[in-house]
Image (cartoon, grey):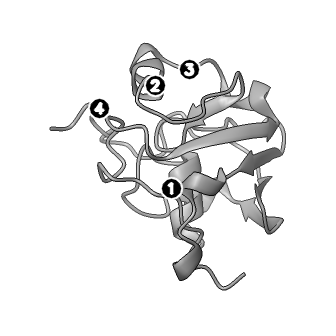
Amino acid sequence: MRMFERSADPTNGLPKRKYRVTFVPGNTEIEVDPDRLPYGDHGLPGSILDIAQGHDIHIEHACGGFGVCGTCHVIIREGADSCGDATEEELDALDHAYGVKPQSRIGCLCVPDGSSDVVVEIPAWNRNIASEER
């Protein structure tokens, strides 16, 4: 079941300038170019999950990035203001997530607007250590 419909225009609402997303642990820094979004079909276009998957950074997403399971839970350590407020849909998905903190977001639903750089922590329970080279 799809909880959201992806826009017919995948650039609708995407950032207008380049910005950086750093994924920790690992300190993998990605320069996000709005002209290259979306990277794939992983969550909303330009979402944290879309950016991660587009750069071979694994974030578990059991529902396929449709915003229903909460497994792509991440913690925004810096740049949370550029991510806007969580929607009711995202808050509902966070109800299913483990270890929620005030800075928690659902990766497939959280779309930074590019107004600042973002630091994203992938919690230990959400990393597949066997598939990571670090």
Real-space CA distance between mark 4 and mark 1, rounded to the nearest whole angstrom:
15 Å
Mark 1 residue element? helix
Real-space CA distance between mark 2 and mark 1, rounded to the nearest whole angstrom:
16 Å
Label 2 amino acid? Glu
Q: Position of residue 119 (x, y in %)?
A: 80, 47
Please identify the quarter of the rendering in which residue 41 is found.
Answer: bottom left
Towards the viewer: 53 or 98: 98
Name the residue beneath numbered marker 3.
86
Mark 3 residue element? loop
Mark 2 residue element? helix
Q: Position of residue 80 (x, y in %)?
A: 76, 30
**Which of the two labelled residues, at mark 1 and mark 3, occupies the earlier sequence position?**
1
Name the residue beneath numbered marker 4.
4
Label number found at residue 89: none
Contact? badges 2 and 3 (CB < 8 Å): yes
Q: Is residue 106 left or right of residue 24?
A: left
Name the residue beneath numbered marker 2.
90
Please identify the quarter of the rendering in which residue 7 is found.
Answer: top left
Task: Give the crowd class for mark 1: few <14, some 14-19, many >=20 residues within 10 Å.
Answer: many
Q: Position of residue 92 (x, y in %)?
A: 40, 20
Contact? badges 3 and 4 (CB < 8 Å): no
Towards the viewer: 13 or 65: 65
**Which of the two labelled residues, at mark 4 and mark 1, occupies the earlier sequence position?**
4
Image quadrant containing the N terminus: top left
